[in-house]
Amino acid sequence: MNYWKQKKRLKKKLNDDLALLISTSGSTGTSKLVRLSADNLNENINSIIQYLDISQNDISITTLPMSYVYGLSIINTHLNQGASIVLNNKSVIEKEFWNKLQKNKVTNFGGVPYTYSILEKIKLKNFDLSSLKYTTQAGGKINKQTAKNILKEYNALGIKLYIMYGAAEATARMSYLPWENIEKTQSIGKAIPGGEFYLEDSNKKVIKEINTNGELIYKGKNVCMGYAENFQDLTKGDKNKGTLKTGDIAYKDKDNFYYLVGRKDRYIKIYGMRINLQELEDIISNFGIENICMQEKENMINVFVKDDFELEKLKKHLTSVTKIHPSVFIFKTIKDFPLNKNYKISYNKELLK
């Protein structure tokens, strides 16, 4: 019998602080892993426990894969407190999920915007949710009307909603919107305990003015050590030194609450006009139409929509709000929006064909 033998053995000493490698949740770009230290993990765990007041009496149920940093964060924070976790692989649209929730007297669970678009269509009052204290939302911006509808039901049931913002590069979560400020549903809130936000303009100058767009910068001990694109990167130390350039464009209001307006990499040029695709999606979404906006051809914008809609009314609305000529838009109807493994909308062009 023949055996393969390795002629050259490689020895690499891992960085002593490296505790976890987790994939970024982005749907495009080169695949890479985020390098997290034990201090990163502990800092974020303790911060989240503090503002959500997680105790050993809490019971959560899994709704997201643990390979997703947000899903793992929910598990870590509860295990750290000696709380209970109900293992589940059913969607919130399935009856089995709600049976598990009721049987185990679940006190909280987390979800991404897609989760809440499903909850919006379910009559929650038909379930026994007397044990449920709150749910959390991260993984993208929740639709304004969806948030309004969810809060209407939650208020009637005595359930709280915590809107948050995070990234794998910050070990999970960077901000939360306090319940007493839930009327600011489109805001990501303020930095978590131990963290700090500020904005930078294109010249790297700190923006102090309110209602002025800039890149959102986060500082905190939960910021990752850097990326790993190959095994050699596992020897590297802390490249970020507690500071994360998020790549998100945001502004703050007079109360120092932050609002995301788009990604640096989602700005395009149409006949010389700078267009924010995220803002465009929000305009169409707030008009009552779920959508994805992408650019595939120069000076053209593809608008993918799922439901039937009145084309001329939408064109008129877009022209009125954006001042963009309707000939720029190409409207395409798709059966369902593609989702990645973390239930976030995927912008993979191949999946939209």
Image: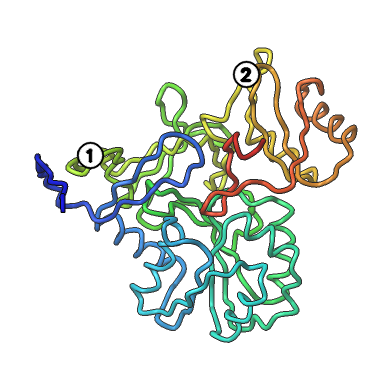
Indicate which disc residue 233 carries.
1
Which corner quadrant of the image does residue 72 belong to?
bottom left
| Upstream in sequence: badge 1 or badge 2 | 1
- Most extreme residue toward the bottom is 103
- Compared with 339, 305 (above or below) is above
- Could you tell me the amino acid type at mark 1? Asp
Q: Is residue 28 left or right of residue 152?
A: left
Relative to the observer, which residue lies in front, 121 or 200? 121
Q: Does the residue at mark 1 contact the one at mark 2 (Cβ under 8 Å)?
A: no
How was the colour assigned to the protein in this rendering? rainbow
Residue 144 screen position, x and y as percent: 70, 51
Q: Is residue 215 left or right of residue 316?
A: left
Relative to the observer, which residue lies in front, 263 or 194? 263
Q: Secondary structure at mark 1?
A: helix
Residue 156 screen position, x and y as percent: 73, 74
Q: Quadrant of the C terminus?
A: top right
| Residue occupying image coordinates x 41% and y 54% | 172
Residue pointed to by mark 2: 269
How busy is the neighbourhood of tag 1: few (under 14 within 10 Å), some, or many (20 plus)? some
| Measured Cα–Cα span from mark 1 to mark 2 | 36 Å
- Compared with 165, 98 (above or below) is below
- Could you tell me the amino acid type at mark 2? Lys
- Most extreme residue toward the front is 1
Residue 318 screen position, x and y as percent: 80, 30
Q: Secondary structure at mark 2?
A: strand
| Residue occupying image coordinates x 33% and y 52% | 222
- Compared with 179, 276 (above or below) is above
Residue 265 screen position, x and y as percent: 52, 29
